[in-house]
Amino acid sequence: MNTTPVRPRNHVIGDVGQTSVSLQLQKWGWTSEIITADYGEDLSCEIFVNGKRTAFHFRCQVKSFHSHKGQVRVLKNGNLSVSIAASTCLTWANSYYPVILAVYDEANDATFWDDVTEQVRKKIKGLTSKTTSFHIKKNELSKTRKQLESCVNRFYSKLLSVVEPEFTCNIFPVVMPQHRTISFNEISELVNLRSLHGISIDFHHQSYEYLPSWITAIKSTSDNYLYGLKATSSVESVEEYFANLKKVIAKLELPLKKGEWLSFIISPVSFKEKSENNRKGDTPWSKQLTDWECFSIIAGSCILDSEFSFTVPNDFKQQIARHSRSWDGFYCVSPSLDIAVQIYSMQATTPAFRESSKRFKQQILGKFVPWTCQKKDVESLHQKLNEIGLVYKEIPPEIVSESPNWTNGIITVPIFNPEIGLIPQTDSWEEFDEGEVKFLLKKKNVLDKLNGKLGSDDITTFILSFFNEFNRGISQELSVLESDYILGMPLYHNKREVLFHKLFFNQDQEVKNYTHIENNLKSKLVRLLGNDCTKSDIHVDTINSGLEPILGITAVFSPSLETSSHDFIEKYKIDISALFDLHDKAKGGVFENSETKNILKYHGELYFEGDSPWGIKKVKN
């Protein structure tokens, strides 16, 4: 007897159909996840706009048509008929999300779909037989994105009891890089546009108190209000709304000085009842569909800030996961070019960041007391402090000028080590407010019994010097990766940095000075770059990975304001890769064995598209 497993043709075509539908949705930038426990739906789908998730969710049941003997039949009018179990129909009728029924036609390699939630609710009283038939119109999936989104839109309109739905958002124009609002008169002139591209424009103002805290980075000469515009439209999809909104923004022109550009902070898009139908204002059923966004007018085009700054070419695989012990940063790698890139942009610091910095500084100051004592008393000081769990650490004598017989340092907790950033945190409010070390000294009543006296402010200044942010004061600007970017906040597009990396296994550890290699690379780089870059630099250094010795070349560029990060990388990626390759065999093999992605993956413990985050094998030392 033949026991070899046999796979029926209908199983094969079924998987092909499911994959085909899922792939088409993903091509649109939506998500489509296969539901492993199949109780009437095959795919769970989320609609994305501008690469960001919206609140619109739907599910999809996929049937594959390859034979006239199956669940799918061709009707005389050319439409398709699909039989579905009554129990499944009842589930669809009671669902809080729309269900789409898709049919994959193997003969034509095409997928057709229809809204079965609407059909099944019309048939709810007739679900007495075992199965119910649904008619599927020839809506070809690949050509009907707008119709599908509109179908999902209609479902949520009914669910939220919204008779005539509208999309609406608030727009706050900002002059960059100063982060300044435009004047009231300029806002009034923009309102005079009234209607553009199917979007109604009205004046809008809102108190800072009811806006996200980060928006206080926007400077206004007015009182507590931020002035802007309200954009309302009755289009059928969020995608269409944003497409029209970008056209409107592109028309909002104002006179600017050299080096300035106009950014537009966009509030979350709301889905609500048409205003004239809702005299009492917003209903509890109004729904925010998106997150905050920011668009800018750069070189005459309307761009999405996050895309302009952080998008990389398609041949780069993006980092998807990391461990707490992984290398810092967010990398994208090109295995074919054997290089990686990182993109840093600048944004204004937020109240939360500034408050956090103040608390962190207070944590540091609470971990030590500046102290000075005679050298002959140091041993006695150590003994008294050890009894209460504290230590005395001396600082270099040149930091504070003092008598040769005296020493300067800090009384601190044993684990405190500012040179490597080791700062133990206290969660006791009493210790935090007074300082952990002072609190302990007073609690043990030993402060007046210790040898020596309080040290000078120069000691405190020296300890804080290990933390640059406190040396310079709390910065008004912050360098961010895409993962740190606050959605909606305008970016300093003139202060972006694109970093190209190439990593090698260092075969010749005797070579310690790479200055001549850096200089050689810099001279070649000057001849390579045009006007797309305001500044550039290259440095070569070793990386302590704890395993094999690694050497890295990093080229840092600041693209011009008019050039997106994507276009800059696309234009120079091949030349930069070739520039790095010129030195592969220098110095007897120091630069051989370049494996940028594998080094990031195995040594940096970073995972990229196509990798399994749980399937990384350790590299043996």
Image: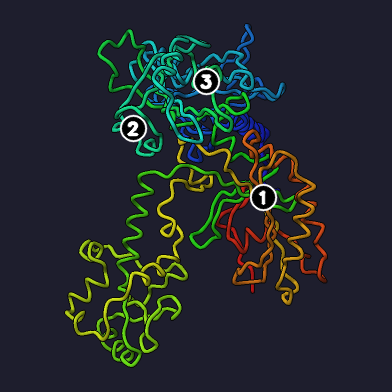
**Residue 254 numbered mark, or none:** 3
Q: Earlier in the sequence, mark 3 or mark 2?
A: 2
Residue depicted at x 75% and y 72%: 507
Q: Nearer the viewer, mark 1 or mark 2?
A: 2
Label 2 near label 3: C-beta < 8 Å? no
Does the rendering let one see residue 59? yes
| Viewer-nearest residue: 437 or 573 | 437
Which class describes the residues within 10 Å of circle 3: few (<14), some (14-19), or many (20+)?
A: few
Q: Secondary structure at mark 2?
A: loop
- Image mark for residue 333: 1
User: What amino acid type should be assigned to the residue bearing mark 1?
Assistant: Val
Q: Quadrant of the C terminus?
A: bottom right
Q: Nearer the viewer, residue 539 or 136?
A: 539
Instruction: Identify the mark at residue 211; answer none if there is no mark.
Output: 2
**Amino acid, disc 2:** Leu
| CA gap, disc 3 and disc 2 | 25 Å
Q: What's the residue type where badge 3 is placed?
A: Leu
Q: CA distance from mark 1 to mark 3?
A: 40 Å
| Residue 145, percent from left and from top | 58, 21
Foreground mark, 1 or 3, reads: 3
Pinpoint residue 143: horizontal percent, then vertical percent: 63, 18
Q: Tell me: residue 595, above or below residue 14.
A: below
Residue 440 placement: quadrant: bottom left
> How is the structure coloured here?
rainbow
Q: State which tag comes first along the sequence, 1 or 3.
A: 3
Query: Where residue 508 sits: x, y (%)?
Result: 75, 74
